[in-house]
Every structure is written in structure tokens, then in C-alpha cells.
Image: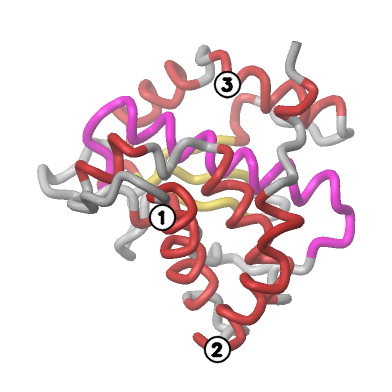
Amino acid sequence: MADKSEPIASPSKSFSSNVHGGRTVEECQGMIRRSLRSPTVKFLREHLQKSGCFVGDSFIKAVNCDKQISGGYVRGEGIMVCSNHMNIQDEVDQVVIHELIHAYDDCRAGNLDWANCAHHACSEIRAGHLSGDCHYKRELLRGYLKIRGHEQECVRRRVMKSVMANPYCSETAARDAMEAVWDVCYNDTKPFDRAP
């Protein structure tokens, strides 16, 4: 992000724990191809195109990652999915959707600065909320058993983890940024508010 060769962590990057050793790059690339057929992925790619951002077939790539992340988005390079941290199709789908929301935010904002804690927090709030990262079934599988209010709590937890991984954001700066932009960004559902 922000003209860096290494992506800043995002909530989707901690989704998979690599318990089963992950997939090969080739296997993951096949899973990405299946993700491209998903209605949500098609919808997001279409809206990226409508916003003036080209998203070709090589925009989303499978790679091996050294860090304990599931994927990331880098401006000018696209989306990476960490094959060695993916085990099932649903994980790949979630990473692709989450990172496409970051790409959409980057495209539509025009001046998004990934080094700005508030900008980063806003995109993470939106991606966590809109991608389904915090669906209660996923939370239960992660060991979080709270049912009431789980979604916002999950989004907050994952935003903090991601923004704190940004080298420009301390824990205090990440928390302050998240709180400052929470209401506006959590309620910003574009492009899903345009769904038929």
C-alpha cells in the first residue's frame, strides 16, 4: 500500500492460521479462479471497473508469504493471496473479497494515504464489515463465543490488529483513528448500497 513493496496488514491477513500447511501457489491460483466466479467478487470487480480502475486477471495472484498473513493489497501491484496460509476455498474467497474492498476504496478515494492511520482504519473498518470477515460462524470457529454485538467487536479487534501493524501507527494512534472514523466508515456501504 502507499507505494510500498510490502502491504500493510489488514484483517483478512490473520484469517488463516496455516494449521494444515496451506496450499501450493498453483492450487491457490485455481482457488482464486473459482473466487472470480463468485457473485460478490464479480460485483466488486465490476464496480472497480466502473470507478475507473482496471482489474485484469493478473490483478489477484497467489504467492508464498513469509509473514503470518493471509493476503494483502498493494497499490499499483494488486492483490496477493498467501497460498501457504490458505486451506479451503472459503478462506481464499474471504481474502479476495476483503482485499477487493481495499482496492475499491483506494480507487474511489483518489487521495487515500495508507500511511495515514485514519485512512487505513476507515478502509479496514469497511473491509471487515462488508466482506463477511466477522460473520458469527467465522467468529465461533476462531474461538470467540459472544453472540450479541459480536460483529462490531470483531471488526474493531481486527482493525486494531491491522492498523497497529502499519509502521506509521502506534497502538494509541490506531485506536484514536479507528474511533474518530468509526461511524462514518462503518456506515459507508458503497458499492453494496448500489446492488440491485
Residue 127: percent from left, percent from top:
58, 47
Name the image quarter holding the N terminus: bottom right
Q: Which residues are magenta?
A: 85-112
- Name the amino acid, label 1: Cys
Residue 96 belongs to magenta span? yes
**Figure check: 193 above or below 133:** above
Name the residue rendered at 55%, 76% in the picture: 166
Residue 21: percent from left, percent from top:
13, 46
User: SS class of the residue under badge 3?
Assistant: helix
Precedes in sequence: disc 2 or disc 3: 3
Precedes in sequence: disc 1 or disc 3: 3
* Residue position for label 2: 172
- Name the amino acid, label 2: Thr
Name the residue rendered at 74%, 21% in the picture: 46
* Residue position for label 3: 40
**Figure check: 78 above or below 94:** below
Residue 134: percent from left, percent from top:
41, 44
* Residue position for label 1: 154
**Figure check: 40 above or below 155:** above
Residue 91 belongs to magenta span? yes
